[in-house]
Amino acid sequence: MEVQCPTCSAKFVVPETITVATCPYCGTTFELESKEKVGDHFFFPPIGKDAAGLLLKFISREYGAPADIVDARVKEKVLHYVPVHFFYIHGNLQGSTAEEVMLIGVPAVGKFKELLRDYPFPVRGKRFFDENIVKKGKYYEPEISKDEAEKEAVSKVVAAIREEARDSGDWFSEDRLVLDVHYQGLVHYPVWEVHYEYGGEEFYGFVDGADGRVIEAKYPMTSEARKKAGVLGGGVLGAGIIAGIVFAATGGLWGFLGGFIPGLVGAAPILFKSAHRIQTTGQIRRVYEHIHFKP
């Protein structure tokens, strides 16, 4: 269908399915129905590498992965263009050292909300939106508005400032809070979804289409690797129990806990891994998902 830019009045053709368009003449991004400007609209072009090859090669280097998994049969590859609202936010508490500067991307479609939660998106490489990408992958319209995304982004910054103030012994008050929020625009980000078959079972993974990083992947761990992990985890836990007994001789219950708890903390992720045949991995490690980094 033909639309008219609210800024330069140029007319151009867009697909019937989209609700947000970017003028190819002046770069203005606006909602088709209301003609309201929504900031700049960008996209990241996908790299010219095979996403399935990158995924399987990465999995093959993971602990316990079958040696021949690189030869697994690829069943399906889908390129998703995910809408993401970007904000640059500077916040601080007046009269305090608590301060945060963040570039935050908020995924605007529910299907990828959890997968891309707190994802470290690259800051370089984006280009002004090209309507042709709608035909080159699975294109999604934003389900979350700019205002809703801004509230989410601001809440993350405020939470970080609150925590920083608490750690420094300061007190947090919204009256002292100063926020400078800049909307960086809507970006359609490429994410590859890959499904592969190994040993008669189907597994999947997601690959960053802009730089080739494996966001998340599922793979089967061999029984031999699971047994080794179980033995190792049991050894670490046993060492903690022995240390606790030794320390209990002089420190009582607290002495026992002082030896046992570190052993339990060290053994837990190893034993957890050994108990699950299907493993989840990725090149983007979130510290809050790792037992050693949980507060």
Image (cartoon, rainbow, N blue to C red):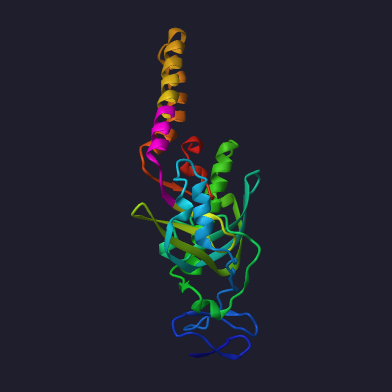
Residue 118 seen: no
Residue 153 magenta: no
x%, y% of residue 74?
A: 43, 61
Q: Is residue 171 left or right of residue 202?
A: right
Residue at 35 percent across and 37 percent down: it is 275
Q: Nearer the viewer, residue 95 or 207?
A: 207
Q: Residue at x 51, y 37 (%)?
A: 293
Q: Residue at x 48, y 53 (%)?
A: 70
Is 230 inside the magenta-drawn segment?
yes
Say if 254 sits above or below 37 in the image.
above
The vertical placement of 176 against 49, above or below, is above
Q: Position of residue 64 (x, y in %)?
A: 45, 41
- Quick check: can you spot residue 76? yes
Question: Magenta-highlighted stretch: main secondary structure?
Answer: helix
Where are the magenta residues, as a range? 218-232
* Up-down relation of residue 163 to residue 267 (above or below): below
Does residue 176 appear to the left or right of 286 in the view shown?
Answer: right
User: Whole-percent x and y of residue 57?
Assistant: 53, 52
Q: Position of residue 10 (x, y in %)?
A: 61, 91
Give the residue furthest to the top: 249
Q: Quadrant of residue 47?
A: bottom right
- Counting labels gives 0
Question: Relative to the observer, which residue lies in front, 237 or 109?
Answer: 237
In front of the other: 168 or 21: 21
Would residue 236 be found to the left or right of residue 98 on screen? left
